[in-house]
Structure formats: C-alpha cells, structure tokens
Image (cartoon, grey):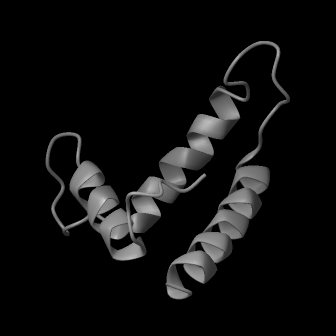
Amino acid sequence: MSDLFYGNKDRANRIKKALGLNGEDKGNKYYRVADVISDLMHFCDHYPYFKPDETKITFNSEYNKGIEFYHEEKENYDKR
C-alpha cells in the first residue's frame, strides 16, 4: 500500500521519474499514462500470478484495488 514517507505529490513525481511520462518515446520510458495502462493490461494477461501459490490477478481486480488505495492515500494525506 502507501509508503508513509511519501506525500501524494511526491508519489506522483516518483512515478513520473520512473516511467518517463513526458511526451517522448525514448528507450524504456513511456509516452503517456495510456501506454502504461495498456502494458499493465498485457502484463496481467501474460503473468496472472506473482507467485504460483497466489490468487490469480486480473487487470480489473488490480485497477479496483488501485482505486481503493488511491482514495485511502488521498484521504489520509489530506487529513495532515
């Protein structure tokens, strides 16, 4: 879930740095968020288990969990 040492703006900057997301198709950096989402969908299709003994994941289940995490993190950070 959330990293307590990062505020939400810090988390946004961290993902931007890791993925690129600056409108350039260069090397292993992403052009836009839609490209990341598309590749994550492919990942879930081809690697449905993180470990053999875990429950199968789908993009939709991970998306819904991500929405849940986002709202928790936003709510908790905004209370500070």
Taking 49 as reference, is 66 above or below it?
A: below
What residue is at 62 percent from the left and 82 percent from the top? 75
Question: Which residue appears farthest toward the front when viewing the image?
Answer: 80
Along the line of sight, the residue nearer the viewer: 37 or 5: 5
In this rendered view, identify the residue nearer to me: 69 or 4.
4
Total numbered labels = 0
Which x, y percent locates residue 72? 67, 72
Q: Give the image location of residue 29, x and y in percent.
A: 23, 49
The residue drawn where x is 38% and y is 62% is 6
Relative height, residue 34 to residue 47 (above, below): below
Direction from residue 14 to residue 69 in the image, left or right? right
At 49% across and 84% down in the image, what residue appears? 80
Query: Farthest bottom residue?
Result: 79
User: Looking at the image, which residue is at 37% across and 64% down?
Assistant: 11
Query: Residue 56's quadrant in the figure?
Result: top right
Residue 79 against residue 43 in the figure, above or below: below
Q: Is residue 47 above or below residue 17?
A: above
* Residue 4 coordinates in the image, percent (x, y): 47, 58
Question: Quadrant of the rendered structure where residue 45 is?
Answer: top right
Outermost residue toward the top in this view: 52
Along the horizontal axis of the image, is 36 left or right of 41?
left
Horizontal and vertical percent position of residue 66: 65, 61
In which quarter of the view is residue 7 placed? bottom left
